[in-house]
Image (cartoon, rainbow, N blue to C red):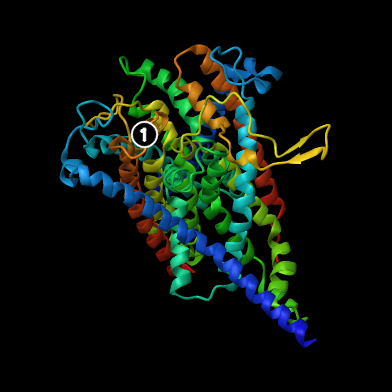
Amino acid sequence: MLFKKKVSKFKEALVERLLFCCSLLSVLTTAGIIYVLLSESIGFFKEVSLFKFLTDTQWTPLFVDKHFGILSLLCGTIVTTVIAIAVAVPLGLISAVYLSEYASQKSRVIIKPILEILAAVPTVVYGYFALLFVTPLLRKLIPGLPGFNALSAGLVMGIMIIPLVSSLSEDAMHAVPTGLREGAYALGSHKIQVAFKIVFPAALSGISAAVILAMSRAIGETMIVAIAAGQQPRLTLNPLVPIETITAYIVQVSLGDTPHGTLEYRTIFVCGMTLFLLTFFLNVISFKLRRRFQEVYE
Amino acid sequence: MNKKQFDKKVDASFSTVGLMATFFGLIVLAVLVIDVFMDGYKRLSWDFFMNYPSRKPEQAGILSAWVGTLWIMVTTALLAIPLGVGSGIYLEEYARRNRWTDFIEINIANLAGVPSVIYGILGLGLFVRMMHLDRSVLAGGLILALLVLPVIILSTREALRSVPHSIREASYALGATKWQTVRFQVLPAGFGSILTGIILAMSRAIGETAPLITIGALTYIPFLPSPPVSFSKDLPFVNVTLKGFFEPFTVLPIQIFNWVSRPQKGFLINAAAGIIVLLAITLAMNGFAIYLRYKNQKRW
C-alpha cells in the first residue's frame, strides 16, 4: 500500500515534469530563433557596416555591384502593408461594429467562423488570385500597370486579414459592458450613436491591438508578395510598380542555391532579423493593449 | 423629415453597410473559388494525381506533392499534438501564477505572431545546417510543428479553461490524484474543443509554403520518400523503415508556387488544378472544425 502510494507520487511528479518540458519548448523556440538570426547577422555585419545597411538606397546582393541597403526592401514592405491595412481596417471595423451591435446573437455565431475561413485559405492561393485575377482586372482600370505590382498584392493581402481585424475588434466591443450601452440609450441615443460614440471608444485599446496585429501579419506575409509584387527592390512608395518586400527577398534567395556561409546566404538572416524585430515590436504593443482592455472589463 | 426619422434612416443604412462589409470578403472568396475552378477543373484527372512533375504541363502531376504533403502532415501531427496539448495542460492545470509562467505566456503569444517565414529561417539554421537533417521530411515536419504549436497550446488552454471547476473537485473528492483528474475528467471533457484546435492548426500547416521554401524544399521531385512499411516475398515479409523521414520532399503548395511562377499557360492551368485540390482539403478541414465547434458548444 505504501509502495503503491510512493509509485503514484513518483508518477505524478514525473508527469508534471514532462508537461513542464513541453511548455519549455516554446521558450526554446524563441531562443532558437534569436540565436540563429543573431549568429548569422553578426557575420553579416562584420562585412557590411550597420550604417551602410540602414542608409544605402540600393539592395543588390545578388549582383556583381553589391549594395545592402535594407531601405529598398523596407519600402516594398511598407507599401504593401499600408495598402493591406487601408483595405482591412475600414472593412474589418465596420463589420465588427455590425456583428457586435447590429447582428443578432444567432447570426453572429454563424457568420464569425465563416469569416475566419478567409484567413484559412493558403496564402499561395491568394498569390495566384492576385497575379492572375486582380492584376488583370486592375490593368483594365489603370492602363500601363505592370504585371507585377504592389497594389494588387496589397489589396489581396488586405482581404486576407479582414477576419483578423474584425474578429479581434468584435471581441473587444463585445467585452464592453451592457450597462454603458443602456446608459446611453437611457439618455436617448440611437443605435449608431451608441455604437460609434460609446462602444467604439470604450473598446479602443482592443481595436488598436487588432489593427497593430494586422499590420504585423501584413509585414510578415510572404507568398502573396512573392508571387504578385515582383522581385525588384526599389526605394519608392509608388504602389503601381514592381517592388520587392523583405519576405519576398527571403523566398527569392532560398529558391536559388546560395552556398552556405557566403554573404548572400547571410542576407537571408539579416532580412529575417529585420522582419523579426519589426513584427516583435508590433506584437508586444498589441499584446499589452489587449491585456489592458481585458483588465478593464473582466 | 425630422431628426428622429433621419436617425432611423442612418441606423437602417448602417445595418446594410455593415452587412455588405461583412460579406465583402466572402464574396471575394467566392469569386476566387469560381475563378480557380474555371481555370483548372479540366486538368483534374486520375493522371494528374498519379503523375510526377514534368517539363510538359499536360503530363505533369501532383503525385510527389500530395504524398509529400501527407508525409509532412503526419510528421507535424506526431510532433505538435503531444507537445502542444501537453504544454497547454501544464500551463492551464499545473503552472503556478508567477513571473516564469507569465513569461512563457507572453512568449507563446509572441510566437503566434512570428511570421511563418522566420520559422523557415530557424529551420534552415538549426535543423538543416546544425543538425544536418538537410531538406528532409523530418526537418520540414519539425518546422511546421513549431509553427503550429502556439495554435494548439492556445486552443488546448481555452478548452480546459471552459471545463468547470466542480468537475475537478468532484474527482479529487473521490480520491483521484491530479494527473488522474486531468487524464480521466478534464481532458475528455475538453476533447472536442481541443480537436477543433488541432484540426485548424493542421489545416494551417497544410497551406504553409514560405517556411518550407526557405529550407529549400525542392520542387522537382520525381520520386517518393521510402514508405515506412513495405512488403516483400522473402523473410521477414514486412519491412519497417524510417528512412523516408530523412529523404527530400515537396509539398502541394510549393508545387503550386512553382507552377504559378512559370510563364507558360499550361503550368498556370496546372497551378489552378493544384489549388482546387489544396482548397478542397483546407476548406473541408475548416468546415469540419466549425461543425465540431458548433456541436461541442456545451453549456455547463
Is residue A10 positioned above or below B213 on the image? below
Is residue A203 positioned above or below A85 on the image? below
Q: Nearer the viewer, residue A11 or B286?
A: A11
Q: Which residue is mark 1?
A: A259
Instruction: Specify whether residue A120 is in view.
Output: yes
Q: Give the image quarter of residue A76.
A: top left
Amino acid under disc 1? Pro
Is residue A109 positioned above or below A237 on the image? below
Q: Which quadrant would the C terminus of chain B be assigned to in this image?
A: bottom right
Q: Give the image quarter of residue A154.
A: top left
Write down the chain letter for disc 1: A
Q: Position of residue B54 (x, y in %)?
A: 57, 16
Categorize mark 1 by other alpha carbons within 10 Å: few (<14), some (14-19), many (20+): few
Seen at 74% across and 76% down, the residue is B171
Left or right, A27 with respect to A120, comes to left
Q: Position of residue B48 (x, y in %)?
A: 65, 19
Q: Nearer the viewer, residue B295 or B59?
A: B59
Q: Position of residue A195 (x, y in %)?
A: 44, 53
Seen at 59% across and 18% down, the residue is B40
Left or right, A264 with respect to A88, comes to left
